Image: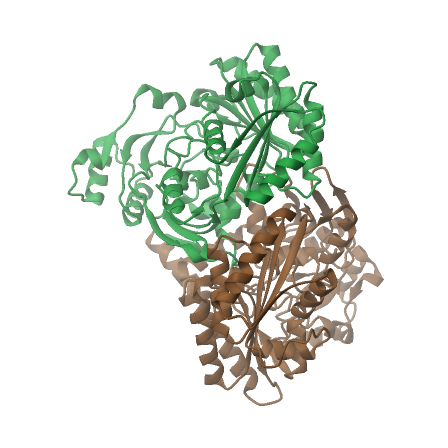
Amino acid sequence: MFGKRLKMAAKKAKRKKDKLIESLIAVVGEDAIYYEHEDLLAYECDGYVIHKGLPRAVVFPSTTEEVSQIVKILHAQKIPFIPRGAGTGLSGGATPMGGEVIISLVRMKQLLEVDFENRRAVVQPGFVNLKLTNAIAEKGYYYVPDPSSQRTCTIGGNVGENAGGAHCLKYGVTTNHVLGLEVVLPDGEIVNIGGIPDMPGYDLLGLLTGSEGTLGIVTKITVKILKQPEAQETVCALFDRVEDASHTVSDIISAGIIPAALEMMDKIAIEGVEKGNYPVGYPKDLAAVLLIEVDGIKEGIPEQIEKIIQICQNRNVREVRVASSEAERQAWWNNRKQAFGAMGTISPDYLVQDGVIPRSKLPEVLEKVAQISSKYGLRIANVFHAGDGNLHPLILFDSRVPGDTEKAVAAGSEILKVCADVGGSITGEHGVGIEKKEEMRFIFNDEEIALQVSIRDVFNPENLCNPDKLFPTASRCAEVKAVKRASG
Amino acid sequence: MKPTSMEQIKQGILQILGSRLPEGEVIHCAGNHDENLLGNSGRLVVYPRDENQIGAILRFANEHSLTVIPEGGGTKRGLGGTLEQADILLSMQKIKGVVEHSVGDLIMTVKAGTTLQEIQSVLAKNGQFLPLDPPFPERSTIGGIVASNASGPKRLRYGSCRDLVVGLRVVTADGTIIRTGAKVVKNVAGYDMTKLFVGSMGTLGIITELHLKLKPLPPRRSLMLLTSPGGTEEIWDFSRRIMDSGMEPLALEVLNPGMAERLAGVSRYLLAVGFEDVPKAVDAQEEWVRQNLGQLRKTDMLHDEEAEAWWNRFAAVGTAPFALKVGSLATDVIPVMEAAEQAANNLGLSIICHGGTGLGISRIYVEDHDMRKFQSFYQTMQTFMAEREGYVIIESAPYTVRRGVSVWGDKPSYLRLLEGIKQKFDPRRVLNPGRFVGGI
C-alpha cells in the first residue's frame, strides 16, 4: 500500500515546477522550497520510521504572512498539507501519507520577546526548545518542558504534540506552560488566542495544544518562563529487583514527596545506555536504576532526600547516592536522556512505545510487559517517567528479519492494550500520529471518537491540514454518526 | 415540539425519573424573589440521581426544544446569561460522593455535585488535598467550580482547574455519555477534550464525574500580611523581587484598603504572601521576607489553621451581586486596582477588590446596588483595559443588567470557532442558551 503511494508521489515530483510549485515559489522564493525527488526523501518520515510517504513539496516560510498565503493557495486547490518542526516526533505525526505539501517552520526560529516581569517569552515555532532555557539562564530563568530531544526539537512541535519530558511530574507538560498562540487556520486565516489567563471563551489553547497539527499551524507561541528552583538534589538508586524499584516509586509519592523528576530504567535499558555515548558505569548485573530529583527551597531539601534514601533502603536498594556535583548530576541525566538512541548499540532497530498507567499499577504492568516480551521473542527495554506513570518500552527488533517489524508493532500494540485496561492511556507525550490511530479504540468508543472528529471539522472541515492522522480509519465512526443523525 | 404547559413538562420529567421518592424530592416549581434577581433559575427544578437520568432529561429537553440550566451550588447565578428562568433548572446536588481515591496515585474520582469542602474532608483523612481555593468552598460543587473555571489566589502555586482536571464523564445535550482523559496525569491521546469543558459554563454538556490531580497536604502553612505606608509602588517592587528570587510563594494577593480593613483591620493597600511547604522551607522563606521587606511593614503573621481560616474569610468576601473580573498582565494588576478605586470614587461607589501580582487576575466587588452606576463603572474599566492586554468581564450582576450589556466583553475575532464547537455539541441550544461569550 505504501509502495504504491510512494510511486505515485514520485511521479508527481518529476513534474518539476508545475503550477502549484510556481505559485509557492512566488510566495517564499526559489531558495525556500524543495520539490525534486532526491530533496524530498529526507521528509519521508519523522522520528517514527516504520511508515514512510513522499511529500509533494516542502516549503520553508519565514513569516506568519507567508504561512497564511501558502495555506490559502493549498486550501483553494484542496491540496493537503502538514506543518513540521524538527521532525523528531515519534508517532509519525509529520509523516506524509503521500502527496502532501510539508510546511516546515524551521526558518521561523526567532526568540521574539522575553518579559521577565511578566515571566513570559514569545517565540516563533521553529525556535529550538533548549535554546529558550539557554537564552534566559543568565538571569536564572528556564522553560520547564524538557523532552529528551530538547537539543533539536522545536517549541512549535512541542505545542503540536503537547510534549512532556523528565521534569513534568512536578511542573506539568507543555499545555501547562503555553499562554498564548498565533495560529494560521486551515483556510489561511490568522487568529490570536489566549495571552492572558482565563481569556473568556472555550479553552482553545488547551484544545490546540496536542492537536498534532490537525487544527491549524502555530506561528507564534507565548510561553511561561519560571525562575530556576533555588536548589536541587539528585539521587541515584540501584536495585537488584525491578519490583523493589517500582514499589519505591509509589512509596515516595505516598510519603508526600513530589519529586521534580522520578525516572526508571531496567536491565536492558541500562545495558543500552552503558554502551551509548554517555556511560556512567552502572554495574552490569543491575535490575533497575531510579533517578530521583527533588527541587525547591534549599532548606527544605535535606529532609526530603533523607526520607527518599530511607524509602530506598526499606525496599532493599543495593546502593543509593546523592549526586556529589553538578557534573555528576549532568552525567546521570545525559546518560538517561540518550536512552532511546543508545538502543541502536544493542539492537539494529527499536520501536518505542508511550503508554501511561496509574503509577500504583507499575509492578503489575511490568510483569505483563515481560510476558509480552517472551510471547513475541523480542527483548524489551523499559525506560520511563515512573513518577507520572509514563512508560517507554523499547521493543528491540531487526527489520532485516522477515516478520520482525510486524512482531514489534504487534507487541507494542499489546502493551498499549495492557495500559488502557488498567485505566491508563495509549500515549503520554509522543502523540497518536499514524502509529496509534487504531489503538485509539482501546480507550475511546465510536461516539467519543466521532465527537473529536466533529471538533476537527470546526477548524479543518476538509481534512486538509495534516489529514488522516490521530483518528482511526473513519468508516465505523462515520456510520455511527450517520445513524445517530437519522434517528435524531 | 414544545409541550405548552409546565404541567406537561413536569409529567414528562416525572415519567423519566420514575422515582419511588416523594415528588418534592425529585422536582419542584421554583421562583422566590432572590432567585429572580440574578436570573438563571428554572420554571421547574429537577434533581436527577445519576447520569442516566440526566441523559434521559436532556433527551426529553432536546426532543421538546426546552432550555436547561445545569447548576451545582448556585454560587454563579450572576455570571452570564440573559434568562430569568429556563424551562428546567437541573440541580446536581443529589449526584455527590467520592467514587475513588487512589492515594498512591494522587488521583481521585468524584461526582460533580460534591462540594469542595466535602472533598477536602475526605482527602484530609489520607493527608492529601485538592489544591483549589475558589470562593464559597462549603457551597460550591466541584462540577460547578470546573464548569465556571473558578479559582483563588493559591493558583499562583498550584495552577487552576485546567491544570488539575485530568478526565471527565459528561452527558452531552443529546443525552450521550462520553468520557474524556483518563485517571492518569499525562495523556495526549486525541484532542484534550477535557479542556473544552473547563470554564464552558455548562454550554457543551453536563459534567457528572471528574478525575482530579491531588497534592499532599503541606506540613506547614504560613501567611504574612504586609502593608505599605507609602503606596502601592513598594508592594509591586516587593512582588517583583520575590518572583525574581528562588522563593516559591503560594499566593501574592494585593487587597485594596476597603478589603484590607475588613480582613486585617488596616485601611491600607495590603499584600498577602503565603507559603506552604515542609517547615524548614517555610521558615527560610519567612526569613527571606523579613530580610527583603524594604518599606513594607509586617502587620500580621498566621500559621496553619489560622492561616487557613484567614483564606476562608477571604473566599467568603465576594457576596456583592455586582462584581467584575479583570485579566491582565501581572505588571498591570496594581494599575487596574488603582483605576478601579479612582473610577469608584468618581462615581461615588464603594468597592472592595483584590488582585494577584504574580497572576494577572483581579476581582472587584461593587457594594452599592445602583445598576446605572455599575454600568458606568464597567465601561470605565473596559476603556482602561482597551489600551492594555487583557479583558474585563462582569462576574456577577442581576439579569436585568446583564440583558443590557455584553458581560463577557468584546466578541473575540475567532467567535466562529466557539460557535462551531457549540453547534457540534448542542445544535438545538438546549444547554444554557446565551450564557457564554458572544451569546453562545
Left or right, B177 with reference to B18: right
Q: Which coloring applies here?
A: by chain
Q: Residue at x 53, y 70 (%)?
A: A317
Q: Is residue B440 left or right of residue B255?
A: left
Residue A13 screen position, x and y as percent: 73, 73
Q: Residue A353 location, x and y as percent?
A: 55, 71
Q: Quadrant of residue A365?
A: bottom left
The residue positioned 35% from the left and 41% from the top of the image is B114
Please, is residue B147 above or below residue B180 in the view? Answer: above
Give me the chain that's green: B
Q: Which is more toward the observer, A282 or A131?
A: A282
Up-down relation of residue A234 to residue A11 (above or below) = above
Q: Where A390 sits versus B73, above or below? A: below
In this view, the residue in front, A130 or B153, is: B153
Numbered disc total: 0
In the displayed structure, B241 sits above or below A124; it is: above
Residue most toward the bottom? A401
Measured from the top left, where is residue A176 in percent x and y?
59, 49
The quarter of the picture where residue A267 lies is bottom right
The residue shown at (45%, 21%) is: B321
- Relative horizontal placement of residue B391, taking residue A66 as reference (left or right): left
Residue A319, percent from left and from top: 58, 71
Q: Is residue A121 left or right of residue A308?
A: right
In the picture, the quarter occupied by the N terminus of chain A is bottom right
Is residue A1 visible in the rendered image? The answer is no
> Is residue B378 visible from the viewing direction of this image?
yes
Who's brown, chain-wise?
Answer: A
x 52%, y 41%: residue? B220
